[in-house]
Amino acid sequence: MVIQQPSNQIKLTNVSLVRLKKGKKRFEIACYKNKVLEWRQGIETDLDNVLQIPNVFLNVSKGQTAPHAELAKAFGDKTTTDAIILEILRKGELQVGEKERTAQLERVHSEVVGIVASKLVDPRTKRVYTTGMIDKALDMLSAQAHNTTADKDKAAAPAAEGTTTPPTTTEEPTAATAVTTDAAAAAAEPAAAEQKEPTKPAKQYTWTGVVATKSAKSQALDAMKALIAHQPIPVARARMKLRITCSTAVLKQPVKTPKAPHGHGHGEDGEQHQEQKPHGTVKDKILSYFEAVEHQDVVGSEWEVTGFAEPGAFKGLSDFIGGETKGQGRLEVLDMAVTHEDD
């Protein structure tokens, strides 16, 4: 039993605790609020601004410091106190208070709203929305998602209570019954074969609010998908401004068509697929990815085009240029999101 004396009892208040269980013992350190996360993210580098006191405790609330023998048994004889504190800071479990958790969620929410507001525009005017309007639209989606979940729970509860199993009766099958059963089974075989390949339902994007376990960029992408899918306000992804430079010798070449897969090149359909002629040139295909062309010109032996394209078309355009131009084409991003600001 440890005797509580002033020499080994240090009482601290208004702290954030970091706990680490090692060697069947739980060790704690007392830190300032909001500083542990900043230290782990690399924002804060001075340990004096993180630790309230450079000691290792068995119980911070009781002020019980960890004896040297317990530390040596758990971490090793040659491990210093500073090294033990660093290990607890890196690997320990952080006890986050309600106010600290709320502040963290507010920071993530503000960052998500800021990212979404910079990437979405009004499709008619191409102007950005204010963060306040994006915040209200996300609140509408969150309320809608919670109401939908609540309605599903209410509908599922009476259905579960009202399900009863019908009584079973055993009768000896007759010849007529056997014939009818065989005919029904034969008729059910085509329907069962059709049901073996169900169509995948379209993915529905929902928004329920920010969480502290995912990055702000990832949550902002989910929020943009939900806003575009449900349209609580008219929104669209801001277009990218791209510039493509390509050799003029490649532009007039026909676009390569994919080869027919094995097993599908026989019969009339297969012959028709093999005899299919390419449609359009490389230049036509490149221009088809642009929503609007701002400028195109030929300088010497190079063709240059600048225009606006949807972000979803960027990967396809990049793959096409890399595969069709054989290293003679180059794609540059001039602006990730083109918007019009109000004066």
Image (cartoon, helix red, strand yellow):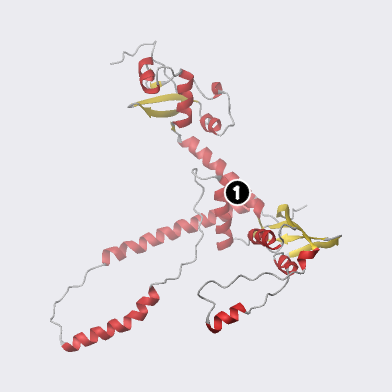
Q: Closer to the camera, 334 or 304?
A: 304
Disc 1 marks which residue? 113
Q: Which residue occupies the extreme right position in the image?
A: 300
The answer to whether residue 112 is seen in the rendering is: yes
Q: Amino acid at mark 1?
A: Val
Q: Closer to the camera, 341 or 119?
A: 119
Q: Residues within 10 Å of mark 1 (few under 14, many from 20)?
A: many
Q: Where is residue 217 drawn, in percent x and y?
A: 58, 47
Q: Closer to the camera, 78 or 98?
A: 78
Q: Is residue 302 left or right of residue 165?
A: right
Q: Where is residue 341 drawn, in percent x and y?
A: 74, 53
Tell me the quarter of the image containing the N terminus: top left
Q: Is residue 155 left or right of residue 250?
A: left
The answer to whether residue 65 is seen in the rendering is: no
Q: Which residue occupies the extreme bottom position in the image?
A: 176
Vertical side of 2 occupied by 319: above or below: below
What residue is at 12 percent from the left and 81 percent from the top? Answer: 172
Label 1 sits on a secondary structure element that is helix
Q: Where is residue 100 drawn, in percent x and y?
A: 50, 35
Vertical side of 90 occupied by 343: above or below: below
Q: Residue 272's image quarter?
A: bottom right
What residue is at 65 percent from the left and 60 percent from the top? Answer: 319
What residue is at 49 percent from the left and 46 percent from the top? Answer: 211
Q: Is residue 183 left or right of residue 253?
A: left
What residue is at 69 percent from the left and 75 percent from the top? Answer: 279
